[in-house]
Image (spheres, rainbow, N blue to C red):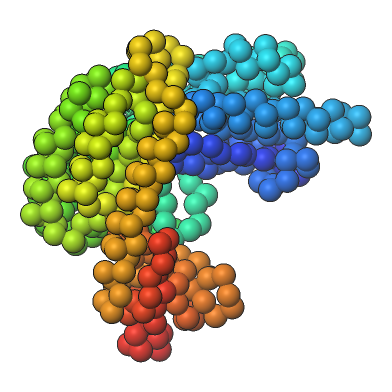
Amino acid sequence: MSDPQAPATRRLYIRTYGCQMNVYDSERMADVLAPLGYAMTERPEEADLVVLNTCHIREKATEKVYSELGQLKVMKTERVAAGLGMTIAVAGCVAQAEGEEILRRQPAVDLVVGPQAYHQLPELIARTHRARGERLAADFAPEAKFDALGASRSTSGVTAFLTVQEGCDKFCTFCVVPYTRGGEWSRPAEAILAEARSLAARGVREVTLLGQNVNAWSGEGGLGGLARQLVRIEGLDRIRYTTSHPRDMDDDLIAAHAELPQLMPYLHLPVQSGSDRILKAMNRGHTAESYLRLVEKIRAARPDIALSGDFIVGFPGERESDFEATLALVREAGYASAFTFKYSRRPGTPAAAQPGQVDEAVKDERLARLNALIESQQRAFNSAQEGRVLPVLFEKPGRHPGQLSGRSPYLQAVHCEGPAELIGRIAPVRIDSAARMSLSGTLLPEAQPA
Ligand code: SAH
Ligand code: SF4
Ligand code: F3S
């Protein structure tokens, strides 16, 4: 597809919102646009092409897109006045959910492209130079996207994301994802393994498998089987995956955690609420008790696992007693970290129309109480590492000269003094002190490169 006439000086600015799947997709968009001569820039005002990769999950996320577009419009006007152009493309979940509205509300937007149509970007961009208002979305055929994006990857880091599953069939009553990403789809194992091999060959040491319901990956052997194949790839020392649904956490995947040292002891397993009444209204398909028993089973397989989760406070009909059940679940499960959200009413979802919408002030108050509890658990989890020696994968230089920054098996950020040669390598670090968000330590002498 590369155009020999394409000037090598076109600039591309991509702004990514939302989940890790969007981060992955943004990298792939940069990959498909590179052969057209687009090089990345950090400055939108000097971009010939701006892509906003958007998120629809909460109202705030969606509104941010429109304010960002307002600012881009000003830059575009200035560039046009200076005889330069700016093509503005809106991608991602807002593009899928309300593409027409975007084109109507912001005339500066040239094209709108849904999450399954990124491979058509080069063609779309060529076409918009002729006509505005192109909208491409809604076919939900990830095969075509991955086939077209499959070949090359420009990733140069130590860690990488790798999408293995997209979409969701669960229809939690608060959530837009089944509508923006379509139904559950699993990428074939061969394509995943080929991409993992090429990442490893580029020096990637840790891969995070991505999916809206990653453990619903339905290829042969399930996600546990896929992990067993991935750990055989030379150079891939760490495997992670996210996000998991409690309903899809099968015994074989749990067994893989006991069996495979490369499968990192960190699990993001959202529960949303600790109240069975609310879980039922959310259509989660599990109870507080079944979730807690599941966590018990996982800890029996991998006792040191760092548990993470997502919580929503103020779902319609949530009473103080329901919220207290959430606090009780958090106390019993014990989290190393968690993401907490106030319920956000999303147009078109069943919960948005439910009676008993909770007051914003009540949501604020509950969120603060939940956050305080989670923070105390996070500090306790981090402090428990003090004095331990952890294998740290070094990813980049630290903030101060001579410092390195890496990750523990539990996904904690770790800082220590050390030589840059260790970037891309795993070395033992004694943890000296813990803060809420990170650990600092001392590199063990045997880790010093010869
Ligand atoms: N598939 C994942 C979650 C994807 S969305 C899962 O089921 O676990 C990420 C998180 O956003 C959800 O876990 C939920 O906690 C939060 N979320 C989704 N819709 C929301 C809404 N309408 N209001 C507030 N938080 C929401
Ligand atoms: Fe949304 Fe529920 Fe699907 Fe997760 S499982 S993406 S919360 S509908
Ligand atoms: Fe947002 Fe879409 Fe991800 S709504 S969280 S970008 S799947």
Q: In which image quadrant can residue 395 be found?
A: bottom left
In the picture shown, does residue 93 fall above or below 11?
Answer: above
Please tell me how many numbered marks the rendered image carries: 0
Residue 245: x, y in percent? 24, 35
Q: Quadrant of the N terminus?
A: top right
Residue 417: x, y in percent? 47, 81
Q: Residue at x 45, y 36 (%)?
A: 364
Q: Residue at x 25, y 19 (%)?
A: 281
In the picture shown, does residue 40 fall above or below 392?
Answer: above
Left-right relation of 175 to 123: left
Can residue 161 be seen here? The reply is yes
In the image shown, does 301 or 50 lie closer to the viewer? 301
Q: Residue at x 25, y 56 (%)?
A: 306
Left-right relation of 233 to 313: left
Q: In the image as oriented, which residue stretches furthest toward the right?
A: 82
Q: Quadrant of the C terminus?
A: bottom left
Residue 393: x, y in percent? 37, 67
Q: Residue at x 20, y 23 (%)?
A: 277
Can residue 181 be seen here? The reply is no
Residue 121: x, y in percent? 58, 27
Left-right relation of 166 to 327: right
Q: In which image quadrant can residue 116 be found?
A: top left
In the image shown, does 77 or 115 lie closer to the viewer? 77
In the picture shown, does residue 370 fall above or below 92?
Answer: below
